[in-house]
Amino acid sequence: MRWNNINPAVDAFTGGPVLGDQFKCQKCGSIYGRESVNQLVANNLGRCISCEAQSVLLDINEEDNT
Ligand SMILES: [Zn+2]
């Protein structure tokens, strides 16, 4: 399912578009880019900024478009 072609992913941390790899909170569905995930891991114990669930940020990059 190419949902990301339907709705441009918005980074829940920065509020900007997610470019490149995308990560999704399993609990609340917030989307993060890799840099935001790094920031959450470094500064927020890897917790989702929205629901504060921990260790639910999944790499949702199932395939390359190449
Ligand atoms: Zn969440």
Image (cartoon, rainbow, N blue to C red):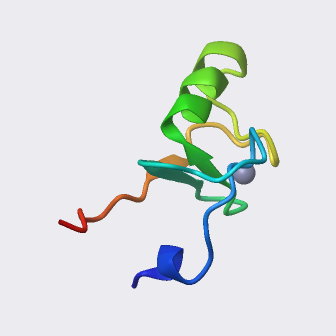
> Is 58 displayed left or right of 39 in the figure?
left
- Counting from the top left corner in percent of width and height, residue 2 is at 41, 81
To which quarter of the image does residue 43 belong? top right
- Counting from the top left corner in percent of width and height, residue 52 is at 78, 40
The structure residue drawn at horizontal position 62% and vertical position 77%, both measured from the top left corner, is 7
Q: Residue furthest left?
A: 66
> Is 14 displayed left or right of 36 in the figure?
right
- Counting from the top left corner in percent of width and height, residue 57 is at 54, 46
In depth, the one of 7 and 57 nearer the eye is 7
The image quadrant where one finds the C terminus is bottom left
Number of dots carrying numbers: 0
In depth, the one of 19 and 37 nearer the eye is 19
The image quadrant where one finds the N terminus is bottom left
In depth, the one of 54 and 49 nearer the eye is 49
The structure residue drawn at horizontal position 25% and vertical position 68%, both measured from the top left corner, is 65
> Is 27 displayed left or right of 20 in the figure?
right
Residue 4 against residue 39 in the figure, above or below: below
